[in-house]
Image (cartoon, coloured by chain):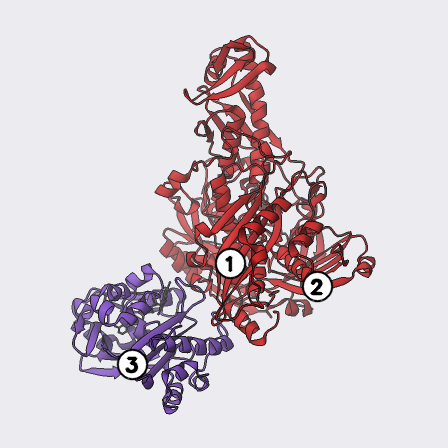
Chain colours: A purple, B red
Amino acid sequence: MRNFRFLQPDSVSTVLKAKEEERENGRILAGGTNLLSYIKMGRVKEGLLIDITRLDELKQIEDTENEVSFGASLTITELLNSSVVQNRLSYLHDTLTHFANPLIRNQATLGGNIADGSPIADTIPILLVLDATVTAASSKSERIIPLKEFFVGPGKTVLAADELLVKVSVPVHESSGVKMIKLGLRNGTACSVTSAAVRVEQDNKKLREIRIALGGVAPTPIRAYNCENALLDGLFDIEAAAGAELEALQQDINPISDVRGTAEYRRGVSVNLVKRALRSAAGMEV
Amino acid sequence: MKKEFQFLGKDFPRKEGRARANGFEKYPSDLYFDNMLYGRILRSPYPHARIKSIDFSEAEKLGAVCVSYEDAPGKRFNLRLVSVPKATYKDWQLFSDHMRQVGDFFGAVAAETEELAEQAARVVKVEWEILPAYMSMDAALAAKDNLIHDKVFLEDQEIKIKNNIACTREVVEGDIEAGFQEADVIVETEFETPRQYHCQLEPRSCVVRPEADGGITVWPTTQAVHNTRILIGSVFNLPLNKVNVVRITGGGHFGSGIHTNPVTLITTALALKSKRPVKIVQSREEDMYDHVRYPSKYVLKVGARKDGTLVAGHMRAYIDIGCHHIQALAYLGVMSGFWHSLYRMENMKYEGTAVYTNKVPTCAMQGYGAPQVTFGVEGTMDMLAEKLEIDPIQLRIKNYVGLGEVFWGQGPTVKSPIFSDGVVELLKKGAESIGYYKRPGSQKQTGRYRRGIGFARGFHTSGTGAPVPGEVKDYTTVQVKVNEDGTIDILTALMDHGGGTLDAAAKIVAEEFQVPFDKVGISPADTRSTGYDVCTHATRGVYCGAGAAHEVAKKTKDVLLEYAARYLDAYPDSLIFSYDEKSGQTRISVWGNPEKTTTIAAVAEHAMNKDWGTAIYSKSIRKVACPPAYTNYFVEVEVDTETGHVKILRVVAGSDAGTVINPILAKGQLHGGFYRGAGMALLENTSYDDKTGCLTNKGSMIDYKMLGIDEMPDPDDFEVIFADTYEPTGPMGAKGIGEAAFNPAPAAVTSAICDAIGIRFTKLPILPEDIMDALGEGHDK
Ligand SMILES: Cc1cc2nc3c(=O)[nH]c(=O)nc-3n(C[C@H](O)[C@H](O)[C@H](O)COP(=O)(O)OP(=O)(O)OC[C@H]3O[C@@H](n4cnc5c(N)ncnc54)[C@H](O)[C@@H]3O)c2cc1C
């Protein structure tokens, strides 16, 4: 039997109190674009649904010199409409235009996309290369977690049973080039089969810093540390980096075959996507 | 050659367009009646199982009315009544304790609200005996016991099933051994096409209301109200005059309503037991477990002489039909027929085997077997052309079955001569328009994006009429009546699935009477008020259905002419109908006597006042031919060699529909048919998790991907060419179009991909991963 209770709290502290009492049974309901399908499929059968969509506290955007912070309940559409995103994080804006479709974007939240723990959540690879952090709050304390340490397995994150994801902070890298590419089975309303994001810092055509992150090629979204290191160790100039075969990437990824694509396909296109994202981030012709 | 018409050939807005756009149109899922219960269907979570016991006590405590195999008559039947009884295999029961697929149904509950029905469905307890499941044809064919069906009936003759083989069919013409001896070149290839889901907008649904006289009224999603009535009558032992099936607009069918959907029978069972109106609207998930297109796997061997003459062909097909017959015998028949009618071959042999598996039962979908067969046959023609070094278009022109030859419209028992043929015109114009002879080819291209142009041709039958009776029933009953103000009503059980079939009937009748389109109305219809109509399928809507309306309209006109002759004191044969645009009136005049003139309205009114009667006529009309509606597509694609994605850049569609009744709707058919055909080529499929027997998409649209609007070319890059033909046996020269619009599309897209990257795919869909795989390995797939 499905058995749900419903709570529409008026403050974050009420949410946290409910989470403290209910723990795993307290289900945060943000946009519900994932949660409702879990309920429909019978993966979630009972508990207290805690609706956080009406809390203004979780809808704030803080724009500081080095960092922009987003409240967890901001929807993808709200992010797309934000002038801060459009101006200071235009690459994030570009990424979000490929997210699902307008209906889902009106509903889906940033916090839900991250807390869901899906290996193909589309905001993650780009947030990973930007060195984003998330803030988790409980009724007792608050902690900041680097996003790269946030994911544990498919659908699993380091969030404790009494914690709420309240904020996502994104450092602004003025001098970096950033690009994320999403690959689905079609353009609109398609889950990613594989996605890749790259951020490069260059110095006189020399690669100074590089971040590579991918979705859909491992149990969690990943940073491609081996590949990053291989490129940096080679002291590559940017042209050479973009032309490299990226063999090391294969050690970073561990894709599976599923209804959306084979492991082999994901291995192959990952290389192509990273290369293309790299060229684009470095301002080269793609 | 085309004729000049007053109304035909011009664009008209759809009669029901306004209601649809404004949300006034009612579909079965919109209906509500006082005292109505909501039903939920009980389904198997296992692909193959037997029910040991079932316990409804908890559901009954919630006030639910429950039905199951325990109170169902054991009678076996086929849901599809289009074929004659002697060609109909029967393996369905209303409910059974033998579950043959995930989602198979063993009972149903009805309760006061949807929520309560859902709850009641969840508390029904079942004890299962799990049987080995056969999720592939190989596994099914190897099985000796625990068969999916032990016995079935062919008409009333019991047939023992062996190795899960549902039925077989062989069709032979000439002698293939001798034929292949004559061949200089032979191509032999295995082809495979997917299990495409219909994805009609409205899931199969039904409302049934018991009536005070002991009868029932039924509002189903169907393409055939009369067959639905006949089946309900037979399954529930009800006299047909107590079963009234209403024609109600359906939210799309694409073939999924040719057979009576199980939900219709289940809703009826609940309504009869509860004695209250019952409604069941299936979820999308249930719908995906309800019906799917026939997949096809076949080896095709074709031999040709050096000059390109085809001499022999052999097709060996294995069809994974899922867990029930929705007339696989007919499917095997049409495969042979469509193949036979594509290219002339004196020696040919078709061997088809239909195999039961524990999957969703397969049924007709737009094109029936034609897209499947055309995919392999057109691929083979391309391969032959390459080997023979003959231009692919010329090879087709040399061998295609055309004017004066015999066309098999619906398998070997439905055939008639071809009287109109626009094939050569369409191939030439299409090639010219897309620049077929200017394509660079795969060899000359490097870089990430590669472009290619390909084409394929095909057809669909227009109906299943023929000069002699065959395995398929085909006729339509129509009544046409002139009202007292000169307007006209058409009453028929003919269905319109959204393609404008009934509009076409109205337009043809308007043309016959020379009255404007909006003066011809389509009456609401149900089985009580209309004579039999077989079904709107097989692209028979315009040719057979509207064709019947035309024949009857002529008879009605004869009655009107009698009245007019009396009124004008002239002879009927001297009367001329003409439309006067200025007054908006249709005049009847005596030739050579301009002063002797009146209007339809005046005659009709006078006939009533004088008690002469109403100009009305009703008749069943069978067409005695099944003309091919030819189609071809020229397609330009761009293949992204980094991702394996295919983009369709340009389409030139060629359609030989005879007289085009309503060009804007006909073009819409081509856009839509191509869209789904391209989807079959590039994306659409339903696959299974062999361990659980579930669909890998879990019945969710998220993982049943269809092409999006983004994947289709800009409408400006989709050109439509209509052939300049006139079908002498058709209503005012018209043939069909609907399924013809689909059939060559998958083959054409495949051919364009081959032109772009030099790799020929023989299995659909061609997913990005298949393209990347093939590019990596550098050979055909
Ligand atoms: C048709 C469709 C298309 C889609 N396309 C895409 C796509 O293109 N890209 C993509 O990335 N995703 C896609 N998704 C998935 C989904 O829309 C996104 O992941 C979305 O961002 C989830 O956000 P939500 O607010 O709806 O989360 P919900 O469904 O409300 O929540 C998801 C999970 O996160 C938990 N949660 C939510 N917020 C918090 C919080 N603040 N703290 C702690 N836990 C929390 C919930 O309890 C739940 O377990 C699609 C979904 C659908 C239905």
Q: Is residue A248 above or below residue B110?
A: below
Secondary structure type for disc 1: helix
Circle 3 chain: A
Q: Same chain for the residues at labels 3 and 1, yes or no? A: no
- So how many labels did they put on this image? 3
Q: Is residue B507 above or below residue B703?
A: above
Q: Is residue A262 above or below residue B219?
A: below
Q: Is residue B572 left or right of residue A192?
A: right
Amino acid identity at mark 2: Lys
* Residue A125 horizontal/vertical position (percent): 34, 76
- Spatial CA distance of label 2 from label 3 is 58 Å
* Residue A270 horizontal/vertical position (percent): 44, 77
At a point 58% along the width and 25% down the height, the residue shown is B554
Residue to which mark 1 is pinned: B679
Residue to which mark 3 is pinned: A147
Residue to which mark 2 is pinned: B387
Find out if the beta carbon at label 2 lies less than 8 Å from the nearest ligand 1 atom. Answer: no
Look at the numbered discs 3 and 1 and tell me whether their residues touch, using CB distance below 8 Å: no
Secondary structure type for disc 2: helix
- Spatial CA distance of label 2 from label 1 is 29 Å
